[in-house]
Amino acid sequence: MSKKKEKANKPKKVILNQRFDDTFRQCIHNSNFMIGFFIILSVILIAVFSGVLEPYPYDEQMVGPRLEGPSWEHWFGTDNYGRDELSRVIEGSKLALWVAFLGASVELALGITIGLAMGYFGKWVDRTFSFLTDLTWCIPGTILALAVVTIIGKGLTNTIIAVSLVAWAGYARPVRSKTMSLKNMAFIETGRAFGESSRAIMFKYIFPNVVPSLIVMVSMNLPGTIMSTTTLSYLGLGSQPPSADWGLALSDGMKFISRAPWLSIYPGLALVYTTLGFNLLGEGLRDILDPHMKSQ
Amino acid sequence: MKEYIIKRLALGVVLVVAVSFLVFSLMYMMPGDPIDIMISDRVSEETKAEMAHKYGYDLPFFTQYFNWVKGVCHLDFGTSARYRQPVWSLLGARIPYSLRLCSLSLLVEMLFALPLGLLCAVKKDSWIDKFCVNVSLVLTAVPAFWFGTLLIVVFAVGLGWLPISGYQTPAHYILPVAAIAFTSVGSTLRITKAEVLEVLHEKYVTTAYAKGLPRKRVLVKHVLRNSLIIVVTLTFMSIPWMITGAVITEKIFAFPGMGNLLLNSIVVQDMPVVQAVLLIIAILTVICNLASDIITAFLDPRIKDTISGGEN
């Protein structure tokens, strides 16, 4: 049995390599993908090397005068506690990536499991969760997340969880339809004939086929997750002071908008830069991996 | 067709009922006692119990829910714990402002997104198409609350042309409307473009050209007419998005609308108000989805065909 498998795998590997080469070439020639990729890469590098890049400790007060405009000492100016804004914006990149990572993980875990179950089992499982997705779409996501976060409590992690609890439906629906189209195919029948359990069929047979479109979905949905989380932080429900979260920084900056407008500008620019990076990456990936969905 | 509409309506009603239950139980799950919000800590336990009894907070969950639904049917959303006023009168004072803000924003958004989307599709790959698509890509990455802040920095603080916040004059509406409209214009433009392009590639458009019809006529009679369906659907579908944008924008511009009320009430856990606003938003969303489905079915004979089994 295992020998047979090996034999069967070999030519497949060559094809896979070829496919990988093709995809790689497509990636290089897709400007959206490349720009998005380098934006996200730069954000990741900034986050990783934040310790070296931050000119001052991000949470140290009075490293300069309060509310001073951008200068050579403080490129992005200082805030009302005399903290260096540039250091805080750099520190915020870590939080933004944490949001992206945790948000995507929770949404994927929920969305994939529920979507697979909906498509595979059909009947009441499908109907129940379809109704649930319809229901979550009755209230705009950010607002529903707002209500959820007041129940489970403030804080960045709770906010990410609340946003993901609302956003899983965006993954479940496409996974469901993909599963439904796959479940009657011959290789599933074969799996069943070999006595595989339902769970094994869902995760070992169907799931690998969903992965390409999932990659696209993640990069398309991430900007929304980051935006919702930042919005909740802006409203004071997410990250709490003295966190360097961009949303929180913007809401602090709003208090001094007439005296220190730079506090409202730089964290927002950083946020838009990151979101735009994910957007472009998503656009590019969609064109490359999911030609059916290709945007004209 | 009739069957389809009845089915959709029935689903809408079920959704509204389910959402009302969701909203009510969400509020029920919130930490904190509604009575504690109304009165100070120094009040004795007995008085608290009396208050709880008076407002029906001591009843079992389902009884509370049914009482609430009964009230809602008569536009009685209970009494705000914070303002000590009937919720409906609080809402009544704020709904006009939100309605004005949202409808203006929707109008501005559509005025920009639809013609530009059409133009981009017709003149695909021209510089104007590339420009619009890139700008809209950037705009979709801009959160409404930051765009509002930027507008304040530039036009209110920097240039001093427009007021920072308030609602008294028409000038007060310009910045909030711009903030909401321009952050949602990007996605609408892109969807419009994609849909129009799809129509352009339809066989009947090719046929129209093959018949020798002039380009202008094909665009107006065939493409534009079919694209109207998208316009209608998009208008209705973007309303829920707009509400989200408006909620936060109202907060930034200190605008006395429902969004501002919702956010302030969530912070102090003024549950009757939060319940009422959430329920109104949910009902609005359900109605919008329903309306877009039904109107699309009316406008697009192909959909009608599939619904009635292709008899007409």
Image (cartoon, grey):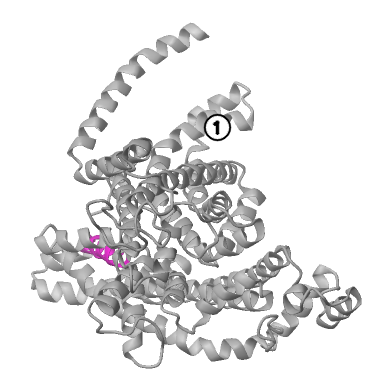
Q: Is residue B195 magenta?
A: yes
Residue at the extreme top: A3
Q: Is residue B167 visible?
A: yes
| Place of residue A96 in the rendered image (x, y in percent of width and height, measured from the top left) | 42, 48
Magenta residues span B188-203
A106 lies left or right of B161: right
B75 lies left or right of A6: right
Q: For residue B87, what is the image quadrant?
A: bottom right
| Place of residue A42 in the rendered image (x, y in percent of width and height, measured from the top left) | 29, 40
- What residue is drawn where x is 20% and y is 32%? A25
| Place of residue B88 in the rendered image (x, y in percent of width and height, measured from the top left) | 63, 88
Magenta stretch prevailing secondary structure: helix
Q: Amino acid at mark 1?
A: Phe
Residue B291, above or below A188: below
- What residue is drawn where x is 67% and y is 81%? B82
Q: Is residue B10 visible?
A: no
Q: Which residue has dot 1 on it?
A: A203
Q: Secondary structure at mark 1?
A: helix
Q: Nearer the viewer, residue A124 or B288?
A: B288
Residue A29, above or below A265: above
Q: For residue A43, what is the image quadrant?
A: top left
Q: Nearer the viewer, residue A62 or A140?
A: A62
